[in-house]
Image (spheres, rainbow, N blue to C red):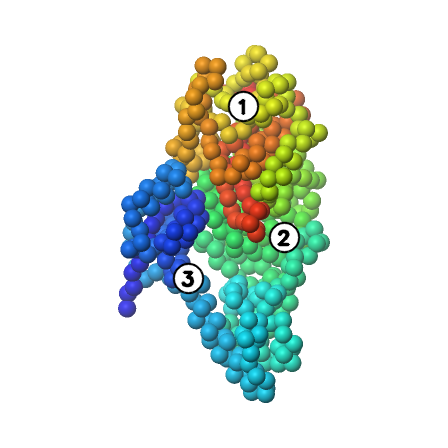
Amino acid sequence: MQTEAIAIVTQAQFAQKYRQYLEKNGILNMAYSLQKQPDGSVALPVIFNKLCQLHLLNLCDTVAPGSTCTITEMKNPISSKKSLAISSHQRLQEKLCALVKRSGVLWTDQLSNDLPQVWKRHGDMIVLNDNAFQAEIWKSLEPEVWQVVADALGVKRIAKTGRISADGFRTPKVTLLLGDDAWVHHIDNGIRYTFDVTKCMFSSGNITEKLRVSSFDCRGEVVVDLYAGIGYFTLPFLMHAGAAFVHACEWNPHAVAALVKNLEVNKVSDCCKIHKGDNRQLHLHNLADRVNLGLIPSSEEGWPVACQLLKEDRGGIFHIHHNVSLYPENRNALFNRKNIDAGPCEEQQQSLTVMLPASGTERAGSSSETTTPVFTHAFKRGATEESILSLRWKGLDNRSKIGTIGGTGCVKRTFTHPEWQTWAESVALRIRNLLETLHKRPWWTNILHIEHVKSYAPHIDHVVLDLECRPCDEN
């Protein structure tokens, strides 16, 4: 029997913001999963009788300016993991309750609360959180208990995760409870991944950023992925964004082994070179159109090598991942003057904000104020599309005009949190200074976009800064 669901469709890079808004307002239909469409857009199932025109206007104008929003019918929508987990959890409890009673022990609320509420699934394996199955009775029921869990959840292998190891490789502490082989297969956005769950991490929480990377237009570009892992972003750059070649850097030998397999299984090995070891020792220069710095909590140690990699004659774009604290006391910490040289202009030192002129060229003038390379979140009218180096997902409407400074019109972006913008401005200035020190000539940096990936607890946001970097004598 065919089922249908009403859905809102938007571009992939706006799906996360749409989802958050719809869920907050009780409009998202939690019974079904978000689904990627053939054209790369994402359909979000909604409860139609709760949706009104005002919601659609808010989505396009406020929640995600520059996005498009259409309504469609999803044929045979896929049930969400949450809705499936509810029934799976009930089935799991029933089977475990029977096992415990057969052993002569009374089932209690404490045991019920000890069962997993969520789990990760990779093919025929589930990975349990470390806070599940803590009661002593489960040890006395091994190994039978794990076979019961596997049968209830429809898998053949079970693993349990612990804290991430502080070994520099972020190796997960994962123990196999059922099964002998820890290698799993996972399909994400049409890309096949394989890896050893006891040696490598796979973050499903980064799916929105992988979708966003997939929507880039990188045709003809050379990309360097400084923290490649098993290929989380290397593969989307190659398979969906159309990068001509990717240099993938990784120092975890287990991740390298998985990356080799993933390049092979996705048939893109010829378009990628793996550089094993510490990327700070990388002997590559002057070749990248784009550098991905996908390390959290901070990729700062990779900034100098990223600057070294960028093409000297035309520059390129950095995608810089970072965990930004939203605590107010940390706002001023980003502006440590011991680490930042704000250039010769006192006004720039005070505000760390420079507006780009609305006239045509990026080239700096001759005065002390105009020869200082511009940076931050300012955008020029008329030259924006050219300067944003074919980021096809980036619209021109997500901006607002703000008056005139010294007779020069300018436009300025606004972001959700001032802490994001403060951090981004600090990074833009420091990257500019690194480039100028390296190349002995003026550069400018320009904040194209700040993307929110996910949040850790209430006050830590994982964000990505898209930073355009160009030499000032570039036409």
Q: Quadrant of residue 399?
A: top left
Three-letter amino acid code of the residue under disc 3:
Ser
Q: Earlier in the sequence, mark 3 or mark 1?
A: 3
- Expressed as whole percent of the image width and height from the top left, the position of residue 216 reads 45, 40
Q: Secondary structure at mark 2?
A: helix
Check disc 2 and give the amino acid type.
Answer: Val
**Residue 136, x across and y down, in percent:** 65, 76
Left or right of 82? Residue 232 is right
User: What residue sits right under mark 2 in the picture?
Assistant: 256
Q: Foreground: 466 or 54? A: 54
Label 1 crowd bin: few (<14), some (14–19), many (20+), radius 10 Å: many
Q: Secondary structure at mark 3?
A: loop
Q: Position of residue 45 (x, y in %)?
A: 35, 55
Q: Which residue is mark 1?
A: 354
Write the residue at 62% across / 23% down. 349
Residue located 55% across and 38% down the image: 420
Tell me the tag on residue 76. none
Answer whether labels 3 and 1 touch (C-beta < 8 Å).
no
- Residue at far top of view: 366
Q: Amino acid at mark 1?
A: Val
Q: Which residue is mark 3?
A: 80
